[in-house]
């Protein structure tokens, strides 16, 4: 999954804002490099980020989504707002990437009505404050797994196709460095939930903390986390650097999967 940030404040400094043509060209390049799906986001969810309203988010993403649908590019839209989801689903978006994990019943119903796919992600708290000393009383993996299992039931009970549900443990969303490492190490335990697993580690701060490197120098660290995640059961990886990741995963799949 290639990341396409239509934002001015992306943590990874790759945001493409006010230039739909540039965004579409970037998406098509990622597809050529090996991306199976493009994840379009119009609001940054980096730690400490400020939310934007639905109209601003739509202003950013709609022109790009329209163009990509016309190019027959499989699209996911990264949003937790039902107002945004409704409009992009009308345009032909195939999947909603919900960082709030279907905790809004309106979102759940919309996805069911449009027979779309969904990525259910775990997040502790909200982006603005999620990294303020996150604590897991029962252990991070136990709580993440319990939440995802519960929300799978919510999704299926609402009529979302069971084969259209993906789960994401939410690396970096209300997790310390040690929490993130534990999730990657124990990722295989999520196979019990019988859903495809998505992992998003690309350029994230825990990699920077381990390597003591800024965001633009985290490619090798990202590749290491992606390879280990794939070995441990990840089916989808959400990344900025598609071409490099594709090469690493082709070798990983040949060796392990």
Image: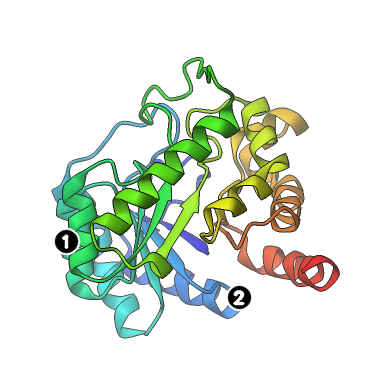
68 vs 123, nearest the viewer:
123
Which of the 4 image quarters holds residue 181? top right
Q: Is residue 109 left or right of residue 34?
A: left
| Residue 34 vertical placement versus 47 (above, below) | below
40 vs 255, nearest the viewer:
255
Label 1 crowd bin: few (<14), some (14–19), many (20+), radius 10 Å: some
* Residue name at image x 47 percent, y 69 percent: 26
Label 2 crowd bin: few (<14), some (14–19), many (20+), radius 10 Å: some
| Residue 6 vertical placement versus 125 (above, below) | below
Whole-percent x, y for residue 99 in the image: 38, 44
* Residue name at image x 60 percent, y 63 percent: 235
Q: Is residue 237 left or right of residue 233?
A: left
Q: Earlier in the sequence, mark 2 or mark 1?
A: 2
Whole-percent x, y for residue 186 in the image: 69, 41
* Residue name at image x 59 percent, y 34 percent: 141
Whole-percent x, y for residue 211 in the image: 77, 33
71 vs 114, nearest the viewer:
114
Mark 1: secondary structure: helix
Disc 2 from disc 1: Cα separation: 28 Å
Whole-percent x, y for residue 117 in the image: 35, 66
* Residue name at image x 35 percent, y 71 percent: 21
* Residue under numbered circle 1: 86
* Residue 255 appears in the figure: yes
61 vs 149, nearest the viewer:
149
* Residue under numbered circle 2: 34
Q: Is residue 135 left or right of residue 185?
A: left
């Amino acid at each position: 999954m290639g990341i396409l940030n239509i934002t001015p404040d992306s943590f990874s400094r790759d945001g493409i804002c006010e230039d739909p043509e540039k965004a579409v060209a970037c998406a098509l390049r990622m597809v050529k490099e090996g991306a199976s799906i493009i994840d379009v986001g119009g609001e940054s969810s980096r730690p400490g980020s400020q939310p934007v309203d639905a109209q601003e988010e739509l202003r950013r993403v709609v022109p790009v989504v329209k163009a990509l649908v016309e190019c027959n590019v499989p699209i996911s839209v990264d949003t937790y707002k039902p107002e945004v989801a409704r409009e992009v689903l009308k345009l032909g978006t195939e999947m909603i990437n919900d960082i709030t994990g279907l905790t809004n019943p309106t979102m759940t119903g919309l996805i069911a009505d449009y027979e779309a796919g969904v990525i259910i992600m775990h997040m502790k708290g909200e982006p603005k404050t999620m990294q303020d000393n996150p604590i897991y009383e029962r252990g991070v993996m136990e709580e993440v797994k319990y939440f995802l299992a519960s929300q799978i039931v919510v999704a299926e009970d609402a009529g979302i196709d069971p084969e259209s549900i993906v789960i994401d443990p939410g690396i970096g969303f209300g997790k310390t460095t040690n929490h993130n490492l534990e999730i990657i190490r124990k990722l295989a335990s999520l196979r019990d939930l019988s859903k495809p697993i998505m992992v998003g580690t690309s350029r994230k701060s825990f990699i920077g903390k381990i390597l003591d490197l800024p965001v633009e120098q985290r490619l090798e660290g990202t590749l290491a986390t992606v390879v280990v995640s794939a070995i441990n059961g990840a089916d989808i990886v959400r990344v900025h650097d598609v071409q490099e990741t594709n090469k690493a995963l082709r070798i990983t799949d040949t060796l392990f999967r």
